[in-house]
Image (tube, rainbow, N blue to C red):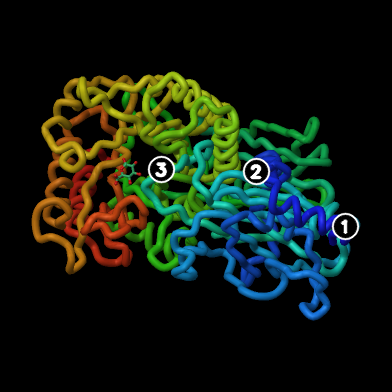
Amino acid sequence: MLERSELAENALAALHDEGYARAYDARNLTHRGMIFTGGRVAQSLDGEWNFCVDLLDTGLRQKWFAMQPQPPAERSEPWDYDPFMGEVVPVPSNWQMLQDKWYFFEGGSWYTRPLDLEPDPDGRLFLRVGAASYDCKVFLNGAYLGNHLGASTPFFVELTDHVRPGRNWLMLFVDNRRQADRVPMQNTDWFNYGGVYREVSLYRTPQAVIRDMVLSLAPDCYDRIIARVEIEGADSARLRIEGLTEVEMSLTDGVGEIEIAASPRLWSPEDPHLYDVTLTAGADQVRDRVGFRQIQRRGTEILLNGSPIWLRGIAVHEDDRDLGKVTTEEDLIRRFDHARDLNCNFMRLAHYPHHERAAQLADECGILIWAEIPVYWAIDFPNPATRADAENQLAELIRRDRNRASVVIWSIGNENADTDARLDFMSGLAAHARAMDPTRLIAAACLVNHQTLRIEDRLTEHLDVIGINEYYGWYDEDFDDLGRIGKNSSPDRPVVISETGADADISPEGPAEGLFSEAYQAEIYRKQTATLAGLDYVKGMSPWILYDFRTERRQGIYQRGWNRKGLIAADKTTRKAAFDILAAFYAERAKETGS
Ligand code: GCB
């Protein structure tokens, strides 16, 4: 609690100090603070949190986080906000979906809740925030513990040395302002949802804590498994892969790596077999369900477990008419059911890391996944702070999902102009991804050269799979150019058409023919699939997109705040005619390619 003299000083500073935010931008909550959470018992902090939007950053200026609960009648000065009483919102949620007056709000907001804790001298306590968009600053009992950048990856804060027995107050300041140095930058084609929109949990661990566990087949073989673990405060651990092996690992400086002779049953879309894995180190234990498979490229082929595969995909956003970016299990199950109805074996999780349950369910139901970070359109490529942010988001995604057999591609960006600064930034990201995870393919959604009508992008040399977003018949009106690009290009590695499509407004306001009609969209799908099937270096596609999604930048008469390229409308139920066209094409492809 601030003293009286501090209060007076603070009141003045709050009005006149424009450097108020500098002290709260440590950017210290990064992938380095992650712990492995699989199999741990979490204490959920979901539910009602006290909430306040704060357009002017008054809370940072006035240090609301330093306030102590006090009954209103006993207060000696007026409070501009009461973190302990008043409006509450559910966590997880996006504030835009809660009240009309918050729909276009972009700025900071405060979330506060009590934490009642028993003293535990032997244990450690970690807070995990599943996702908060975009800058999340964490305060406990008035102390600033740090901030995290990035709207879609989880982060951890160790609370051990900051908690007191009994009542504690946890405050999060979550700021979704679009800024020039962010990833993504100011301009996107998806809605800028704000808030704490994935689960918040507490984890108790012993002193020795398992930070990481990574399992995969060794490169190019099927009879050896590599396991790598990172454990703080232990020098040995026991790894058990149910039905396969149990081994003792010894660690040096907290890190252990072992190669185990074992021939696991291979994971594939036809047989998505998972093994139960347990890692025990002292009193700490984690679990996971892990599949083993090889994904490789050879020339223009993509090989799954040594055999060529054609990726029959669909792209999805994390977006819901009622919940915004909040993802439920039911929503994910419906999404995979629709993918199965389309005869898909592949899904692009665009344009940022989706909820971790998406890849877990894909592991179970046998759908291959393209996962990506939001290095989208213009990015401040020369800015080292932007690069650090992008690298951290990539590292958090990889550390969170690298035991998922379903995830076969890390994508490092989408439709970025081919400049020297971008090449340096993104080739760096590709190298970073490979160093962290040599067992997957690296991709990006690249551009075609519209003058020369060729696939031409200097980044492709650094990729395993060239993603191409093309909208012939929609933004590019001469459809025949697609065929020309096909003939003019001879890439030396596989191409996946990471986007193609057209809008269709099937509401009563939608047109019967021409652009934005259901018939026009269907025709584009007919022509696209017929053309692409003839290009031998095209090894898959993920058309844009499964469901219509909300976006501020689309305000045309048939859009009304929505991108309507979905094969299914925003109700996630009503299929458009193009759905069946793609499903039939994929059924054919599956027969022809035998995969
Ligand atoms: C694109 C973008 C995607 C957009 C889509 C569209 O190329 O990658 O984010 O939503 O086109 O509908 O214009």
| 10 over 429 or under it: above or below | below
Circle 3 crowding by C-alpha within 10 Å: few under 14, some 14–19, many from 20: some
Q: Give the Cα separation between the discs numbered 3 and 1.
A: 44 Å
Q: In this rendering, which labeled residue sits more in front, label 3 or label 1?
A: 1
Assign the N terminus to one quadrant of the image: bottom right
Q: In this rendering, which labeled residue sits more in front, label 1 or label 2?
A: 1
The residue under label 1 is 5
Circle 1 crowding by C-alpha within 10 Å: few under 14, some 14–19, many from 20: few
Residue 287 at x, y = what percent?
65, 52
The residue under label 2 is 245
Residue at 74% across / 56% down in the picture?
Answer: 63
The mark that comes first in sequence, 3 or 2, is 3
Instruction: Pick the residue in front: 184 or 218.
Output: 184
Assign the C terminus to one quadrant of the image: top left
Residue type highlighted by circle 3: Asn
Residue type highlighted by circle 2: Thr
Q: Give the Cα separation between the discs numbered 1 and 2.
A: 66 Å
Residue 237 at x, y = what percent?
77, 42
